[in-house]
Amino acid sequence: MSLSCKVGRFPGWLNREPVRWILSLGFFFVIWYAVIWVFRFPEYVLPTPATVARILWQDAALLFHHALMTMFETMVGFALALVIGVSVALAMHTSTIARYLTYPHLVLLQAIPLIAVAPIVLVWFGFGPLAKILVVAFVCFFPISVNAFEGFRSVEPSYRELLDTFGASQWERYRHLYVPASMPGILSGAKIAATYSVLGAVIGEWLGGSRGIGVYMTRAQRSFRNDRLFAAIVIVMVLSLGLFKIVESIGDLITPWMRRKRHE
């Protein structure tokens, strides 16, 4: 008689994503309170979750006002990076010369610190939304373009040869083979970029502007209101998670086979 044991399996009710999120957040809040209690941090140094929740409630209208601008800059910059990133990846895949001329510069651009790029962009394009949109696009461009390019390269040569035997044109090869096969790579890059996009907008707003979560954080810092800084951080986390989930949901719609594989 053989015994089998399923290692790493959770009870049925724990397999629900909302339940796991609630438990994870609850554990995080317990650690937060424990750190404050053990190290005796005063409220002005490390506010409690209850204090942060109170600030979120009191400043809800103001935070919503700033968050709208941040989300607008993030969405437009992310969309711009998606279009340009996939286009550059497509150009590198179709042309060896374009790949040799472009790929090294992608790596070099990624090596430039964002904190050094953002002030230059603000000097060139002013303190309006356009500068923040370009900062977001700069942050998101590299993971999208590189993952899309690797997705194009990952196509099995035998599939390409099969299409060639049927006389498929280059357009038909990309439509029926390269684009569907590269979608997991493109979506992976988009999800990585989504987690950085809000941060790019906030850094741009931090350096200069009149509206946005970064502006709210700057004013909170200057008035030594750590509770408002933590409230702004919570908003940034929520916006980043929201954009990540939007990208993930769109990916589930256009690549249902990846959704089934993820939930296996």
Image (cartoon, rainbow, N blue to C red):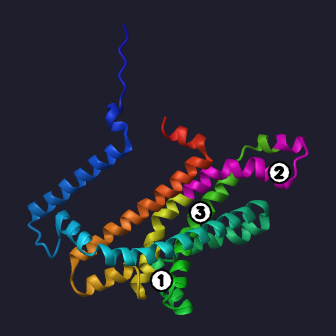
Q: Secondary structure at mark 3?
A: helix
Question: How many other residues sit within 10 Å of disc 1, few (<14), some (14-19) or many (≥20)?
Answer: few
Q: Secondary structure at mark 1?
A: helix
Q: Which mark is residue 172?
A: 2
Marks 3 and 1 sit apart, C-alpha to C-alpha, by 21 Å
**Badge 1 is on which residue?**
116
**Quadrant of the rendering where the N terminus is positioned:** top left
Nearer the camera: disc 1 or disc 2: 2
Amino acid carrying mark 2 in the image: Glu
Magenta region includes residue 114: no
- The boundaries of the magenta stretch are 161-189
Mark 1 and mark 2 lie on one chain; the one further toward the N terminus is 1
In depth, the one of 65 and 252 nearer the eye is 65
The reply, left or right, for residue 205 in relation to residue 145 is left
Q: What residue lies at 56% left-to-right and 53% top-to-bottom?
A: 250
Work out which residue is located at the far front of the displayed protein and give it. 61
Q: Main secondary structure of the magenta part?
A: helix
Does residue 10 show up?
Answer: no
Q: Quadrant of residue 99?
A: bottom right
Does residue 134 show up?
Answer: yes
Figure check: 177 above or below 81: above
Marks 1 and 2 sit apart, C-alpha to C-alpha, by 43 Å
Figure check: 166 above or below 219: above
Amino acid carrying mark 3 in the image: Ile
**Badge 3 is on which residue?**
144
User: x%, y% of residue 171?
Assistant: 83, 55
Nearer the camera: disc 3 or disc 1: 3
User: x%, y% of residue 143?
Assistant: 56, 63
Work out which residue is located at the far right of the displayed protein and give it. 167
Q: Secondary structure at mark 2?
A: helix
